[in-house]
Image: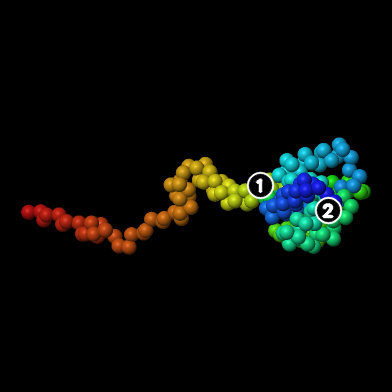
Amino acid sequence: MPSAKVLEQKKAIVAELTERLKNSVTGVLVNYKGINVADDTALRKELREAGVKYSVVKNTLLSRACEEVELTGLQTTLEGTTALATSDEDYAAAARILANYAKKSKSFEIKGGYLDGEVVDLATIDSLAKLPTRDVLLANVLGAFQAPIASFARAIQAIVDEGGVEECLAKKAPAEEAAPADDASPEATEAPAEAPAAE
């Protein structure tokens, strides 16, 4: 039977895992069997830089933590070696990085995961893995916002290049034709004064 000290340590680990599961938006479980030290170091570095927490966990302790947060659907995957990758903000980072690594390795495989407190299947994890990075998404959104602004800026520049607003308006407005005179002026129609009669 484990000592009281060991039991306390296990309780602390379960409590820590429980908080980690609660506070994360997504998590992915992998079978890391067969990964060498160099690859493991590179993988951990990539995950860390993406804001993903990654650690090897004991199946029994993770199972208890899953019960605490009602992720019991993950318990069926808790066999063999297990590592847990969680992210507090980025929904796709863990799935994307781990899926890319799994493609290169025969033994390293994704076992399961969750999203916003719900267990998801491998197809959903695969879909998450195909999402672009946060930076790419932000660049796309920024590009969409900048497109109308850029068009407006080009229009303004065209006006400036054409000599200003007045010049542009003058070119756009139809030339006004001079109105023809309807009647001859009164001065023109008056009869000339009669010459005085000679005496």
- Few, some or many residues within 10 Å of mark 2 (<14, 14–19, 20+): some
Residues packed near mark 1 inside 10 Å, few (<14), some (14 to 19) or many (20 plus): few
Counting residues from the start of the chain, the first of labels 2 and 1 encountered is 2
- Can see residue 34? yes
- 31 on left or right of 21: right
Quadrant containing the C terminus is bottom left
* Secondary structure state at the residue bearing disc 1: helix
**Residue type at the position of mark 2:** Asn
Q: Are marks 2 and 1 in contact (CB under 8 Å)?
A: no
* Frontmost residue, 32 versus 176: 32
How many numbered marks are there? 2
Q: Which residue is drawn at 72% across and 51% down?
A: 15
Question: Which residue is the extreme one toward the left?
Answer: 199
> In the image, residue 22 lies at what x, y percent?
69, 55
In whole angstroms, how far apart are the C-alphas of marks 2 and 1? 40 Å
Residue drawn at x 72%, y 59% as measured from the top left: 69
Of residues 114 and 58, the one drawn nearer to the viewer in this rendering: 58
Q: Is residue 147 in sight in this rendering?
A: no
Question: Residue 7: x and y, percent?
Answer: 78, 49
Q: Which amino acid does label 1 sit on?
A: Ala
Label 2 residue SS: helix
From the top left corner, tell me how far across and down residue 66 is, in percent: 76, 58
Rendered location of residue 61, percent (x, y): 80, 53
Residue 154 circle label: none
Question: Which residue lies under the disc numbered 2?
Answer: 59
Left-right relation of 163 to 4: left
Which residue sits at x=11%, y=54%?
A: 196
Name the residue that disc number 1 marks: 139
Of the residues tagged 2 and 1, which is closer to the observer? 2
What residue is shown at x 80% (from left), y 57% (from top)?
Answer: 63
Q: Is 23 placed left or right of 156 in the picture?
A: right
